[in-house]
Image (tube, rainbow, N blue to C red):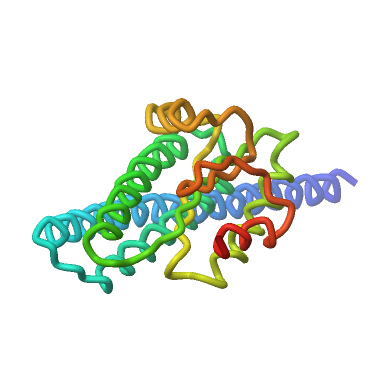
């Protein structure tokens, strides 16, 4: 009887050790992947800054390299996707994630300042949109709904429409200045920058009307 009890106890201990090792291994793998994503964001952010700086120089010399501009825009979108992955892994209020979002907001504004110069110097027309979303529980679903509408809208006009997303609740100088400048008082909300209209679109039709104008 004692031998049976010892065997049962031994199996329990072995099972516990195996489970602990597996859990630790999975955690380390997950953490390593998240670290790699974080590193990729930093590398991509540096690449975007370099591309934007290169574009800035060309614009200063009145050289309209549209291919370079598209490259910078695609890289900007890629960083946004990776930050969303970090949010899912670490949480939307993780300090590291918030730091990356603040850096991303600054890069977005730099990109926006360049499209204005590109329009002036290179005979191109863009349709910039500022999207202020919220990660708060009561506003999250509505933010996701509007985000889907904006993504669909951009897919129809990928090179003309420029969407810049900002966390309304982010304690960032960049976001606070935007909210003050454009009187952004609620989220989720969409600012049609060229018209300075603040709306909460219910469908893609609400946005396409502005393109028609």
Residue at image position (66%, 59%) is 149
Residue at image position (63%, 31%) is 186
Q: Is residue 149 left or right of residue 53?
A: right
Q: Residue furthest right?
A: 1
Viewer-proximal residue, 54 or 48?
54
Position above or below: 43 against 191: below
Q: Is residue 110 left or right of residue 15?
A: left
Residue 13: where, in percent of width, then height? 70, 46
Q: How many numbered circles are shown?
A: 0
Viewer-proximal residue, 112 or 71?
112
Residue 65: where, in percent of width, then height? 21, 70
Quadrant position of the C terminus in the picture: bottom right
Residue at image position (30%, 48%) is 113
Q: Is residue 197 left or right of residue 143?
A: left
Viewer-proximal residue, 42 or 107?
107
Question: Is residue 31 visible in the rendered structure shown here?
Answer: no
Residue 114: where, in percent of width, then height? 27, 53
Q: Is residue 140 left or right of residue 2?
A: left
Q: Residue furthest left?
A: 61
Position above or below: 60 against 5: below
Residue at image position (32%, 52%) is 111
Q: Residue furthest front?
A: 213
Residue 130: where, in percent of width, then height? 50, 46
């Amino acid at each position: 009887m004692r031998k049976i009890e010892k065997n049962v106890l031994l199996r329990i201990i072995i099972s516990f050790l195996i489970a602990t090792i597996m859990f630790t291994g999975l955690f380390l793998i997950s953490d390593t992947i998240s670290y790699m994503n974080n590193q990729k964001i930093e590398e991509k952010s540096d690449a975007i800054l370099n591309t934007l700086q290169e574009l800035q120089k060309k614009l200063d010399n009145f050289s309209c390299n549209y291919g370079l501009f598209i490259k910078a825009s695609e890289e900007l979108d890629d960083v946004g996707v990776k930050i969303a992955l970090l949010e899912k892994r670490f949480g939307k209020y993780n300090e590291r994630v918030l730091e990356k979002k603040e850096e991303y907001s600054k890069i977005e504004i730099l990109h926006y300042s360049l499209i204005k110069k590109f329009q002036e110097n290179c005979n191109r027309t863009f349709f910039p949109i500022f999207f202020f979303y919220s990660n708060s529980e009561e506003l999250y679903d509505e933010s996701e709904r509007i985000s889907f509408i904006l993504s669909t809208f951009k897919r129809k006009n990928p090179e003309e429409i420029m969407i810049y997303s900002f966390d309304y609740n982010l304690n960032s100088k960049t976001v606070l200045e935007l909210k003050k400048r454009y009187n952004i008082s609620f989220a989720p909300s969409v600012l049609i920058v060229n018209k300075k209209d603040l709306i909460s679109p219910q469908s893609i039709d609400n946005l396409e009307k502005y393109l028609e104008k």
